[in-house]
Amino acid sequence: MTLQLRPFTEADFGTLIDWFASEAALVQWGGADMRFPLDDAQLGAMLREGAGDRAARWLFSGVVGGATAGHCQAALDWRHGVARLGRVAVNPAFRGRGLAAPFLRQVIDRIFADPAFKRVELNVYTFNNAAIRTYRGLGFVEEGVRRSAVQVGPERWDTAMYGLLRTDPR
């Protein structure tokens, strides 16, 4: 199964919106500031951050056989050469097929193809064991945990911070 990386576009909005059936699923994907349900306005704001030569964010789609199989964003700190991966998701119809690692490898390669970036980092909820296995398999190193960092309904979630340097083995 061949996965291709391409920019996320407005044509992808409807597909991505369908992936999140609850507030918890949306927050797990997009962070505590997301409003359920996900809508065109929220995605449009993200897409606008991706405009220009020094965009604040790059947005990616992973495509398999013409279908959108994955989504990932990278918030860009051009001054410090840091890209923060976030909003990583695999289409529910494609889960369990081993697509996350090759998709993220292409995203990381795209980031490091720009000489401005020396570090890729991310936050992940500590209960998301599948994502953590994927990140570690890609060479990310755990750098700390923010305890009780987010509240979703009555629950509090911890987030782990991971980093990958351009010079780290991958």
Image (cartoon, grey):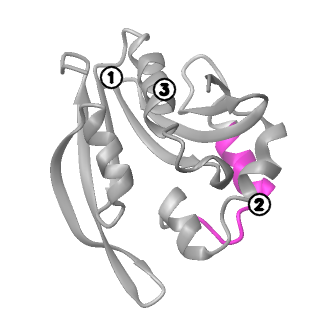
Q: With 11 as the anchor, is 142 left or right in this view?
A: left
- The image's mark for residue 94 is none
Where is residue 20? Give x, y as percent: 66, 64
User: Dot 2: what SS?
Assistant: loop
The quadrant of the rendering that contains the C terminus is: top left
Residue at image coords 78%, 41%: 12
**Closest to the observer, 41 or 87:** 87
User: Dot 1: what SS?
Assistant: loop
Residue at image coords 25%, 40%: 136
Q: With 80 as the anchor, is 62 left or right in this view?
A: right
Task: Please name the amino acid that badge 1 sits on.
Answer: Gly
The residue at which mark 2 appears reads as 39
Q: Earlier in the sequence, mark 1 or mark 3?
A: 1
Query: Which range of residues does the magenta coloring cover?
Result: 33-47
Residue at image coords 65%, 44%: 46
Label 2 to label 3: alpha-carbon separation: 24 Å
The residue at which mark 3 appears reads as 107
The residue at which mark 1 appears reads as 81
User: Dot 3: what SS?
Assistant: helix
Residue at image coords 60%, 34%: 59
Structural crowding at the residue carrying mark 3, measured as other residues with C-alpha within 10 Å and reported as few (<14), some (14–19) or many (≥20): many
Say if 50 sits above or below 33 in the image.
Answer: above
Q: Is residue 33 among the parts visible in the rendering?
A: no
Where is residue 44? Give x, y as percent: 75, 46
